[in-house]
Each structure stands twice: as C-alpha cells, then as structure tokens.
Image: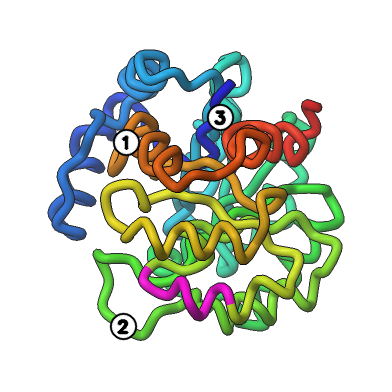
Amino acid sequence: MLIDFHAHTFLDKLAPGAIASLAEKAHLTPRADGTVAGTKRLMRAQGVDLFVALSIAVSPRSERHVNDFAISLLQDEMIVPFGSVHPDSENALSELKRLRDAGVKGIKFHNEYQNFYVDDDRAFPIYEKCAELGFIMLFHGGADWGFEPPVKTTPRRMRRVCEAFPEAKIVVAHLGGQDMQEEAIEQLQPTNALIDTSFTGSFVEADICKRSVLAFGFDRVLFGTDCPWDTPAVTLRYLQGMGFPEEGMRKICYKNALRLLGRE
C-alpha cells in the first residue's frame, strides 16, 4: 500500500492558471496538471492507493471557497481532503467547526502564502481549536523557493507551536524544514511533530533525507511528494535507495498515515 500525504489539487477552472503561476514563481516544472482527475490518474499509474489533497486559504476572502472545494472531495474514496483557515479571518473558528462537522480530517497552513509567522500569537487560538477538534495540522516547513527570506516557518519557530500544543497532531512538511533540515532535526526531533518527505525526491540530497528519517524515527515520517512538483515514483525510488528496513518503509509508506487518519 502507498499513501501520499502531501499533494495539491485545484478546481478544474483554476488549475491551469494556478499551476502556471506557481511554476513561474518558484521556477519549477509541474509533473501533473493540478486537476483532481489528472492527479488521480498520476497517482493510480504510480501505485498510490490514497492521497491527501491540500488547499491553502491565501486570504480571509478565499477561505470559504477553499473549504467548499475540500468538502466536495470527501466522497472520493481515493482522496483525503484537508481544509485551510486564515488567522486574519473573523470566521476561522466557525470554519473549523464546519469542516469538522463535514468530516474533514486536517488543516493545511502555508505561512508564506498566508503571510504570517507560524508562532505569531494571533494564530494560537486557531491551533488550539484545531487541537480541540482533533484536526491534523499540516504546516509547510522551512523555505519556499517562490519567496524571499525571512522564512516564516523556521524549525525554531515551529518548535514553539509544538511545545504549546504537545497533544496536537502536527505534521511539518519537507522533512521539517525545506533547506533547513539540520535545524529541523535539532529543533523538532524532541517535539511531538511528524515530518513528511514531500519535495525531496528530486530536490534534496539523499544523505540529508536519510539522516532526517533516522533522527525522527520510522514512526514519525510520512510519505509525501508535493505533487504536482514531484511524483510518487521518483520519491519512492529515492527512499528505497536508502536501505531502510522493510517494516520502516511500510511505516513511512502507509502505516503512519493510517494511524494518523484513524484508519488502522
């Protein structure tokens, strides 16, 4: 079994423009078209059984539209949609309740696109409500190639959030910090955070990834690609080349995801 815990999809009418804009901003070549159908075709062709579809409320105004899209994906047996809320939205807490009542399992935060530091106090009531409602919180970690410094979700800042909510379900993408993996090991390994392998297969040296996985342990690593920017096949080959034990690979590829999603 293979679960991709980190992929992005868009409404059909928005996908072409969104993918083109993101690719230009970060100087990346997309591997899929960003539509739900196109992403599902790629996932099926490359052996993925289930994938988490992440959306981002880049502004308070977009929040409800983003979450309507997430809710619309709940009936698809191949997709686990995550919603998103914005800390400047006066409706953020009610949106969280709406998402929970609909059956959504997680919330995506991307502090660069949402333009707030991850440990900004104004976001803490949202994190508290997420933890109370049992949401998985998935954060972009570290740098984003489409944005100039300063980085808004450094591992050091992320640690403050983890320590404030030790019982929360927190996943920090990109091995805990894109281009900041050593800091992620130092700052986040002692916390409750899990990490994912998104945006590694084509973009991170294998020895860095292997060191991160071994530091966090096989129980705290989730297979993810950041599709459409990387693919399951590339990421799986990359991980298989590290010589991890079979049980460790099973935990990374699907067991940890099933546990976190309550599907064991």
2 or 1: tag closer to the N-terminus: 2
3 or 2: tag closer to the N-terminus: 3
Residue 210 higher or lower than 253, as above or below: below
**Principal secondary structure, stretch drawn in magenta:** helix
Q: Is residue 218 left or right of residue 79?
A: right
Label 3, secondary structure: give it: strand
Split into 4 quadrants, where in the image is the C terminus?
top right
Front residue of 213/125: it is 213
Q: CA distance from mark 3 to mark 2?
A: 32 Å
Reading the image, the residue beneath label 2 is: 149
User: In the image, what residue occupies the spot 32% across and 25% down?
Assistant: 35
Residue type marked 2? Pro
Relative image position of residue 72 (x, y in whole percent):
55, 23
User: In the image, what residue occupies the spot 27% across and 33% down?
Assistant: 15
| Foreground tag (1 vs 3) | 1
Magenta stretch: give its range: 179-185
User: In the image, what residue occupies the spot 39% across and 32% down?
Assistant: 232
Q: Is residue 178 left or right of residue 194?
A: left
Residue 139, quarter of the rendered image:
bottom right
Q: Can you tell which mark lies on residue 3?
A: 3
Relative image position of residue 257 (x, y in whole percent):
67, 37
Counting labels gives 3
Split into 4 quadrants, where in the image is the N terminus?
top right
Give the class, few, some or many, for how many residues have Cα within 10 Å of label 2's Cα (few <14, many ≥20): few
Label 1, secondary structure: give it: helix
Q: Is residue 181 left or right of residue 161?
A: left
Q: CA distance from mark 2 to mark 1?
A: 29 Å
Residue type marked 3? Ile
Relative image position of residue 241 (x, y in whole percent):
40, 42
Q: CA distance from mark 1 to mark 3?
A: 14 Å
Give the class, few, some or many, for how many residues have Cα within 10 Å of label 1's Cα (few <14, many ≥20): some
- Residue 181 part of the magenta segment: yes
